[in-house]
Structures are given as C-alpha cells and as structure tokens.
Amino acid sequence: MNLTLKVWRQESPNDKGNIETYEAKDIPAEASFLEMLDIVNEEIIVAGGDPIHFDHDCREGICGACSLTINGVPHSKENGITTCQVHMRKFRDGDTIWIEPFRARAFPIVKDLVTDRASFDRIIASGGYISVRTGSAVDANSLPVNFEDASESFNAAACIGCGACVAACKNASAMLFVGAKAAHLNLLPQGEPEKDKRVLGMVRQMDAEGFGNCTNQYECEAVCPKEISTDVIAKLNRDYATAATREAVE
C-alpha cells in the first residue's frame, strides 16, 4: 500500500506547530497503524531527519498510551479499539491520512503527537483509590457483592485512561473517565467508606485541571475503545450531588 500522511509536527510545547506531508510507501496491509509509523520513521531517520514522535507502550490495546487522532477521530473510526489495534487493511491504497494529537487544554502537547496526560494521574491521586484497611486477603465468596453491582464495576474498571473521550468532546470534558474511575470503586463494598470523599475530590480536581463540562453529546461513549457507557456519568452526577449535600449539612 502507498499512502500520503498529513502529520502534525511540533518541536516543543511553545512551538506553533504545523502539518507536514510524508509518503508511506510499500506498507503491508497486515501492519498495524503504529507499525506503519515505525516504517515511515525508519525512512525519515535514514534520510537524516527527525522521526515523528508518538506515544506507545503495550501495543495490545491495554495501556492507553497510543493517543492519536486519525482522520479527525480519536483512535480512528473503528469501534472499540485503540490506535495500536487499527490495521492498515482498513484503509485503501492511495488514501490520504490525517494524523494529529489528542487536543485539549488539559492535555498540552509535548512534541509532535505526544501529549502530557498527567492531569488524569492527578485526578486519580485526588481520590481514585481505596485507602481504608480492608484486612488480609479473604475467600472470594466471604464478602457478598450484588451481581449487578459487580458487573457494572467490572465494566467501568475497563477504562484504560487513554483520553479519547476528552479529545472527542467539544468541551474537552473528562466526565466519562472520572465517572468510570469513581464507579468501579463506589459500586463495591470496599469503596463505600470513602465514596463521598472520593467523588468530591476527583470532580473538583477535574475542574481544577481545566476540563470542560459535559453537555450530553455522547461523543465520549462513541470513541471509547473499551465502549464504556455514559451511564457512569449519570451515576457520578448523582453521587456528587449526594456527597455535596452531605458536606454542606455537616
């Protein structure tokens, strides 16, 4: 396959940045999108140029590092997969592909397609954990958990924190991410003692990071590689309202 790539290049966070054109020649149809970029980078390096910088790690759809917008859609138009799981057979020979970073004020560009998503880490640090002592490991069935709650918690825990939801949202909202991270703990007995503290801390940190508000357009759900439902946002809103009310009363 022979393709034309329109790639965002930006030398540093303070650089203006621009789109540059590259020819991707003789790309195997079975190659992944990131493998295609590897091939192009090898040619750039041989020619003495600066390779295209992009985030990657596991390349198995688990880590959430591969934060690319492909033809205007985070992770591409394919549903339920990350960038590293996109294969070149999904494109046609001769296609022009536009490749840009995830864009959000809370995700500043470091270089080229690499963004700083440490804001997500700070949200987790503000409450996305269980700190109360739960004791030694117990038998699996000794602590009853409602099946529906367990299933919803498991589904929410699938979030890999890639940031596609933020990149797709016109308001750069992180509500799907925060909702998922809060729900997978709040739905379990172990997370109940710190539920109010967790929700208040995470939502307020999210606002402090500069993420926008959710206006229920559902772009986040559409691009989520783990297909997490916006139901977690509704739950987050309910939990936050309850926690804020209790805090005001106290």
Image (spheres, rainbow, N blue to C red):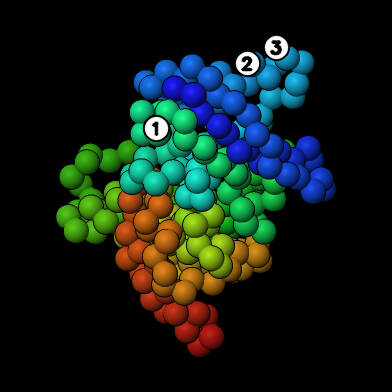
- Marks 3,1: beta carbons within 8 A: no
Visible residue check, residue 51: yes
Point 36% across, 69% down: residue: 235
Task: Reply above or below: 201 against 150.
Answer: below
Q: Earlier in the sequence, mark 2 or mark 1?
A: 2
Mark 3 sits on what residue?
46
Visible residue check, residue 182: no
Looking at the image, which residue sits at the far right? Answer: 14
Mark 3 residue crowding within 10 angstroms, few (<14) / some (14–19) / many (20+):
few
Task: Reply above or below: 31 against 192.
Answer: above
Q: Nearer the viewer, residue 58 or 216?
A: 216
Give the amino acid at mark 3: Val
Counting from the top left corner in percent of width and height, residue 104 is at: 62, 57
Q: Nearer the viewer, residue 82 or 199?
A: 82
Give the amino acid at mark 1: Arg
Q: CA distance from mark 3 to mark 2?
A: 6 Å
Mark 1 sits on what residue?
92
Task: Reply above or below: 40 against 241.
Answer: above
Point 39% across, 65% down: residue: 218
Mark 2 sits on what residue?
42
Given this view, does label 3 or label 1 mark the residue nearer the observer?
1
Q: Nearer the viewer, residue 167 or 174?
A: 167
Give the amino acid at mark 2: Glu
Helix, strand or loop at mark 1: loop
Point 33% across, 38% down: residue: 137
Q: CA distance from mark 3 to mark 1?
A: 27 Å
- Marks 3,2: beta carbons within 8 A: yes
Q: CA distance from mark 2 to mark 1?
A: 22 Å
Looking at the image, which residue sits at the far top? Answer: 46
